[in-house]
Amino acid sequence: MNLSIIISNRNDTVMLSVTINSVLESLRPFPPKTTEIIIVDNSDSAIYKLLPSVIPMEYVRERKIKIFRQSSPCLFSARELAASKASGKYIACLDSHMISGRDTFVDLFEFAENFSTKSTGFIHAPLKWAHHHERSSVIERDMSVNELGDWHKSKSRTGLITWKGMPWLCNRKWFLDRDKGLGGYGALSDHHISWGGGDMHIGIKPWLLGFQNWGVSTDPCTHIGPFPKIDQGDDTNHVRPGKYRLYGASGEYPHTFGFLVSCYVLGGEAMIERNESTLINRFGRYLDFKKWRSKAIELGQQERTWLLKRQKMSFEQLLETKPWISTT
């Protein structure tokens, strides 16, 4: 098996169907029986019962699509479970509400096969939002001013990047390996932490561990929602027609708490202190960071110890050396 597309699903139905059919089309250039779609679903039970009505079940019977059930809702543990259930040499990650680009997976796979080395971490494709033009695609977070990263415009060529969220492709064994590889989402997955901080967490870890993140100039994948004029109001997990399904109830602990845990794991208490105002300004409406700081340190301690034993550079050294601007 060459490639496994992994999708975590929580309470998406129609949009999950759109995502799956989009992926099936984009996988057509691959030889038969060399690709698969792995879905780990942790929807509410009423929504889970509806999945057979929105998924093309003939592909399930053919084992082109494989569905696994996770009772505890958590985006991060679901993606790790999907990776562990996959058979592909590589895994590529999408949200359950996306349209894949025409040549995205082909280009990412060919880059991995022809140009990746032992130091390659994630290989990223551009991302755009459904209500934006493709010229607004992004492929990297800008860490030159803000340590947590602001969106950077898409590169016009393939090259090293800082980090970003999905769509990404990587070696499956590397992603899961907690001895010589990335070690997955670590504390965020181990403690079933709700949405927030996961992209930053696994995006920065490769650099600290001595690996590189790459961006590939290919077709962008389209993220369906949120739509600013529709999805106003509190961030809940309430599902109704036309509303973008949010991750407000996707795990344990408060929404965005993962950012605080990730900051501690990646850069210790010093990173939390340096970014306290940024965290409060961005996510303070969801979380009292001063109240939850000690809990974040408690939950992140084990992975922080793990990272300190294995990292090739500290987070501060990463900011200073900026290895992503090296010759490519």
Image (cartoon, rainbow, N blue to C red):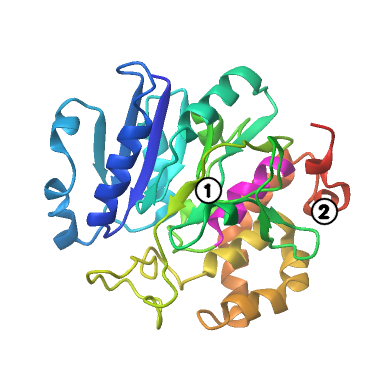
Secondary element type, mark 2: helix
Q: Within 10 Å of the Cα at label 1, are there few (<14), some (14-19), or many (20+) other Cα atoms?
A: many
Asked if residue 297 lies left or right of residue 238, the reply is right
* Amino acid type shown at disc 1: Tyr
Q: Amino acid at mark 2?
A: Leu
According to the picture, the residue beneath numbered tag 2 turns out to be 319
> Which residue is nearer to you in this view: 286 or 161?
161
Q: Is residue 47 left or right of residue 146?
A: left
Residue 42 visible to an observer of this rendering: no
Image side of residue 307 versus residue 312, left or right: left
Calculate the distance from the C-alpha at mark 2 to the C-alpha at mark 1: 21 Å
Asked whether 202 falls inside the magenta stretch, the response is yes
Tell me, for residue 325, which label it has, or none: none
Pointer 1 residue: 185
- Residue 90 in percent (x, y) is at 48, 27
Q: Quadrant of residue 64?
A: top left
Locate the C terminus by quadrant: top right
**Residue at image point 78% right, 66% down:** 270
Q: Is residue 164 visible?
A: yes
Between 280 and 103, the one lying in front of the other is 103
At a point 46% along the width and 36% down the height, the residue shown is 92
Q: Is residue 301 above or below residue 156?
A: below
Query: At 61% across and 67% down in the image, what residue appears?
Result: 260
Q: Position of residue 47 (x, y in %)?
A: 18, 60
Which segment is the magenta one?
A: 197-208
Q: Secondary structure at mark 1?
A: loop
Specify the quadrant of the image occupied by residue 181: top right
Q: Quadrant of residue 145?
A: bottom right
Q: Residue 82: x, y in percent?
A: 37, 39
